[in-house]
Image (cartoon, rainbow, N blue to C red):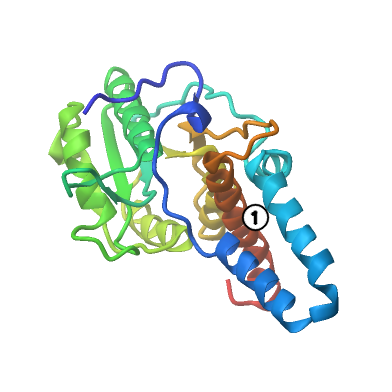
Amino acid sequence: MQPLRCNSKPVDLSRKTYVTPFKLILFTLLALFFAAIVRWKRARGPLALCAVALFWLLAAGWLTAPLLDLAQPRQQSAAPATFAPRTAIILLGGGTIYDDDNVLVPPRDVLTRIEVSAENYAACKRTAATCQVIVSGGNPQRHRSTEADTYLPYLLRRRVPRADIVLENSSRTTYENARNVSAIVGQSRYDALILVTSAYQMRRALLDFHRFGVVPQPLISSARHARVGVLPRYDNLVNAELALHELIGIAQFHVYRAIGWF
């Protein structure tokens, strides 16, 4: 498998081939429209028209583009990381998928996170005394292996020594990523922390890490962009799902903080 190269700026995954399973947001929205159409017979026509219009706007990119703008940081250029004598690079998990041979592998955007982490590890080793990569990701999808364990061989292939890799393989959510990694970095005296993840996850990830008193440098590995046009596209629906998931997560974070749950 050929690695994705990421140099001075994050990779645009909107034109890459990838397979991302839908979560529940768009499916739930479609189910609600269907239930409303069945329940209110007199409003079936307008409700059906609204449903078609909404999903066309998402699939054609007209609604997906602003959703991505809200979810992703405005500044998406990958500024060079600043290394210190003791540096930790935090690689956030993004799921696992089965390829055509039924082998568990990282999704395309996670391959970019791995590549960016490995490149920055190599740069860090040229200037810093201690560099480590903390891989955070459990098994929320209940696949054969955790995210962290699945990503490990890819880091090893990119010449990151096993002795410099710390596996955190129990997190199931971004909040748990932040909580569990904060416990790891709290036990070590790191001078610099670098958080590597995709643009769509970065804003919520920083909120969660700040919640636990960890303030890492954000390093965006890839960004997603809608392809606006007339024809519906599946990748626009995938991007809309991701953006909605992150926006709901951000709203949930603030609500939970307000009522004292976080």
Q: In the image, residue 121 lies at what x, y percent? A: 30, 28
Q: Quadrant of the C terminus?
A: bottom right
SS for dot 1 = helix
Residue 106 sits in quarter: top left
In the figure, is residue 219 to the left or right of 61? left
Which residue is at 40% across, 32% downward? 17
In the figure, is residue 15 to the left or right of 142? right
Per the image, the residue denoted by label 1 is: 247
Q: Which amino acid does label 1 sit on?
A: Leu
Q: Quadrant of the N terminus?
A: top left
Q: In the image, residue 107 lies at what x, y percent? A: 34, 42
Which residue is at 62% across, 55% downward? 244
Near-viewer residue (166 or 3): 3
Can residue 230 be seen in the rendering of this structure?
yes
Dot 1, how many residues are within 10 Å of its Cα: few (below 14), some (14-19), or many (20+)?
many
Q: In the image, residue 20 lies at what x, y percent? A: 42, 47
Q: In the image, residue 70 lies at what x, y percent? A: 70, 44
Which residue is at 58% across, 41% downward? 236
